[in-house]
Image (tube, rainbow, N blue to C red):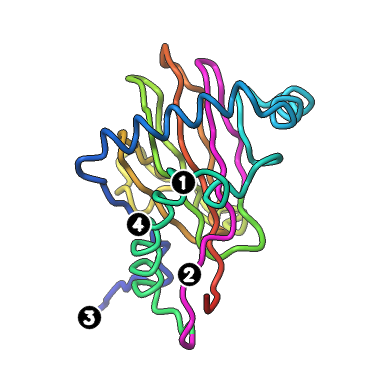
Amino acid sequence: MATIQSFFPTLVYRAEFANAAKLNRDLEMAAQSLSRDDIAGLRWCEKHGYPGYTSYASLDDLSWRIPIFKKLERLIDKHALAFAKALHWDIRGGKPICDSMWVNVMPEGGSHTSHIHPNSVISGTYYVTVPEGAGPIVYEDPRLALMMAAPPRKGTTPRGMRGHVSETPRPGSLLLWESWLRHEVPLNKAEGERISVSFNYVIGSR
């Protein structure tokens, strides 16, 4: 008798915010305002060839600066705690605390290459506007570089065993993952801007 067991899962947490229309309108207005007025952020995007706008390098403390982002942070907090529990972390009386939060406005033709989020434990994105055809976020199997001579997988491979897995968000979607999980955003083929809010969590006692 033989058995095959599954070990070392990679978890991605997804939630859909109900009745999020007003929240998303307010976040969109704030994002558009920042994309016009954040001169330092716009200069950084131009210097580094970043398509569209991100406040990542200029204003990554939006929940401290702008009330609507603080409201969003409070909504995300409970999901970050639920995710930490699902990961069976021994956080010794601490809790996930939002360490940074920034906005992204990606136009048609924009993309974000593969990357991770150092110096944090949970990262994620909340989606404000997702035009039709804006595309997914793509997660990479963290073992991919270690597979060496392994043959390629078949096209019929189950989703959970693929080397790359896509999640297509909607307005109001929240995605959380462990910060070491490499991910990317493919080319935005939509006629419109894909607006999202990204963030990092650390474990603290605040």
Alpha carbon of mark 2 to alpha carbon of mark 1: how far? 20 Å
CB under 8 Å between callouts 3 and 1? no
**Three-letter amino acid code of the residue under disc 3:** Met
Q: Earlier in the sequence, mark 2 or mark 1?
A: 1
Check residue 1 in the rendering and tell me which mark sits there, or answer none: 3
Check residue 18 in the rendering and tell me which mark sits there, or answer none: none
Alpha carbon of mark 2 to alpha carbon of mark 4: how far? 14 Å
Residue under label 2: 96
Secondary structure beneath label 1? helix
Magenta stretch? 92-115
Q: Nearer the viewer, residue 69 or 103?
A: 69
Does residue 31 appear left or right of residue 16 in this picture? right
Alpha carbon of mark 4 to alpha carbon of mark 3: how far? 35 Å
Check residue 67 in the rendering and tell me which mark sits there, or answer none: 1
Q: Which of marks 1 and 4 is nearer the N terminus?
A: 4
**Three-letter amino acid code of the residue under disc 1:** Pro
The main secondary structure of the magenta stretch is: strand
Does residue 188 appear left or right of residue 52 in this picture? left
**x, y percent for residue 23:** 32, 38
Alpha carbon of mark 1 to alpha carbon of mark 4: how far? 25 Å
**x, y percent for residue 16:** 26, 46
